[in-house]
Amino acid sequence: MDSTVGASTLTGKRVMIVEDEFLVAMELESELTDQGCVVIGTAGRSAPAFALLEDETPDAVLLDLNLDGETPTALAEALRRRHVPFIVVSGYSSHRLEPAILRDAPRLQKPVRQRELVAALTEAMAA
């Protein structure tokens, strides 16, 4: 892994991880901190993610498509209303992305590659 990739564009950016698989969340957190990001929190379901949003406004959110059987549609809608960019992170194929708010969001396929993560976050926060 090249830990300098994108560091200048992501340093200090505040990112929230919404991922129900503990090891995946840990890996994403490690990759983000390697890039200089501040991970403001991780949540494995929508309810704790909403609680984090009450206290923090992230620059971006990594959003797993399937949170222990729950589709995070309401969370995606809340992020959109707050103008917080989010990236769907999933092992599922794109036909599983319903509703449109999830289907039309930027998407990373699991397992996430660091270069793709950096590029997606940089692009999402620049939009």
Image (spheres, rainbow, N blue to C red):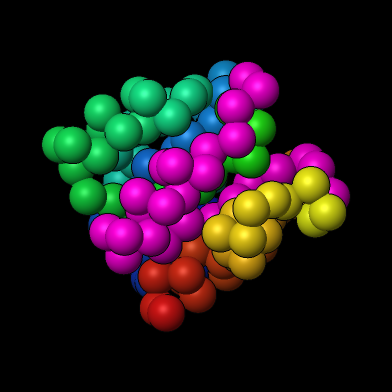
Q: Could you tell me which residue is drawn at 46 percent across and 49 percent down?
A: 76
Q: Percent x, y for residue 60?
A: 38, 56
Q: Could you tell me which residue is drawn at 80 percent across and 55 percent down?
A: 94
Tell me how many marks there are. Answer: 0
Residue 20, placed above or below residue 66 = above
Q: Percent x, y for residue 9?
A: 39, 71
Is 8 inside the magenta-drawn segment?
no
Q: Is residue 37 visible?
A: no
Q: Is residue 30 left or right of residue 58?
A: right
Q: Residue furthest bottom?
A: 127
Q: Quadrant of residue 75?
A: top left
Q: Is residue 24 left or right of residue 124?
A: right
Q: Could you tell me which residue is drawn at 36 percent across and 53 percent down?
A: 79
Q: Is residue 23 left or right of residue 60?
A: right
Q: Percent x, y for residue 104?
A: 63, 66
Q: Is residue 19 visible?
A: yes
Q: Percent x, y for residue 29?
A: 47, 37
Is 83 inside the magenta-drawn segment?
yes
Q: Between residues 123 and 98, which one lies in front from this camera angle?
A: 98
Residue 28, placed above or below residue 35 = above
Q: Residue furthest front?
A: 99
Q: Could you tell me which residue is drawn at 39 percent across and 70 percent down?
A: 125
Q: Quadrant of the C terminus?
A: bottom left
Q: Between residues 39 and 62, which one lies in front from this camera angle?
A: 62
Q: Which region of the structure is painted magenta?
A: 68-93
